[in-house]
Amino acid sequence: MKREPLRYLENAKEILSKSPIEDNRYTDVKHVKSACGIAYLGVLEAINEVLLKKGLTKKELPKKVEEYGKALQKYVSAHNGKLLREFDDIYDELHIAGYYRGLLHNANAIKDYLKEARDFIYRLH
């Protein structure tokens, strides 16, 4: 099932590749912000897939980050808070710092965050 979420990550990498790198920093904030946003959407898509498999309807899927956290706790990581902490980190790094505020520039860090998102998607499935 994880094919669609991974497609988001591939799209994020493709967008990121359009930004030049100077001194290990991406120079085009627009491409970095877009890539981070798309990668985060891939994570949400992966969570949605798992929740649908658990019996939720599309209408019951979370709509806010807090609801995603509660759904992860209830349906996926009831006995393992590590997954929830990873989701919180991805939210802070990709969505807030990368997409929303445009604070990420370091090429290695951004690549690491995309890898975290990929690893999270694999752990879900």
Image (cartoon, rainbow, N blue to C red):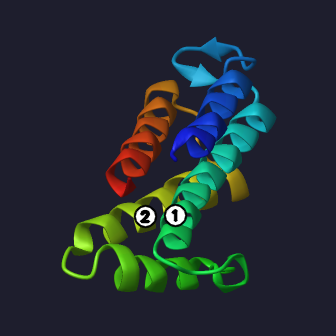
Q: Residue at x 61, y 13 (%)?
A: 22
Label 2 to label 1: alpha-carbon separation: 10 Å
> In the rendered image of this protein, does residue 63 appear above or below residue 8?
below
> In the rendered image of this protein, does residue 48 appear above or below residue 116?
below
Q: Residue at x 51, y 35 (%)?
A: 110
Which comes sooner in the sequence, label 2 or label 1? Answer: 1
Q: Is mark 1 on a helix, strand or loop?
A: helix
Q: Is residue 20 left or right of residue 76?
A: right
The residue that label 1 is drawn on is 47
Where is residue 115 drawn, in percent x and y? 42, 36
Q: Please identify, in this view, whether the residue under mark 2 or under mark 1 is nearer the observer.
A: 1
Q: Is residue 88 left or right of residue 12?
A: left
Mark 2–mark 1 CB contact (< 8 Å): yes
Per the rendering, the mark at residue 87 is 2
Amino acid type assigned to the residue bearing label 2 in the image: Phe
Q: Nearer the viewer, residue 61 or 63?
A: 61
Q: Which residue is drawn at 29% across and 74% down?
A: 77
Where is residue 104 drawn, in percent x and y? 58, 42
Amino acid type assigned to the residue bearing label 1 in the image: Ile
